[in-house]
Amino acid sequence: MAKIKITQIKSRINAPKKQKLTLDALGLHKMHHSVVKEDTPAIQGMVNAVRHLVEVTPA
């Protein structure tokens, strides 16, 4: 299965609590932190919810 690299590029300070929890679930805890995840529909939905805070690239 394909993998994607997710990097947090914007601050979570003024984000709603639901978006902060989504970032935590993705494993992103601070700015410019990156994680590599499998490209599944569940992960795609989470990324879509916080697409303005993260950058996604193929891993």
Image (cartoon, helix red, strand yellow):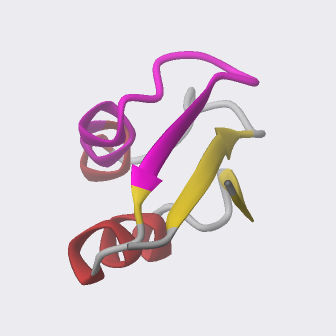
- Which residue: 77% across, 39% down? 9
Q: Residue furthest bottom?
A: 41
In the image: residue 51, left or right of residue 20:
right
Q: Is residue 53 above or below residue 29?
A: below
Spot occupied by residue 17 in the image (x, y as percentages of width and height): 28, 41
Q: Is residue 37 above or below residue 47?
A: above
- Which residue: 62% across, 50% down? 5
- Which residue: 33% across, 77% down? 45
Residue 32 part of the magenta-drawn span: yes
Q: Is residue 19 above or below residue 36?
A: below
Q: Is residue 23 above or below residue 45?
A: above
- Which residue: 34% across, 42% down? 26
* Viewer-proximal residue among 5 and 10: 5
* Viewer-proximal residue among 40 and 1: 1
Spot occupied by residue 1 in the image (x, y as percentages of width and height): 38, 73
Quadrant of the snapshot with the C terminus: bottom right
State the image quarter where residue 40 is shown. bottom left
Spot occupied by residue 11 in the image (x, y as percentages of width and height): 68, 31
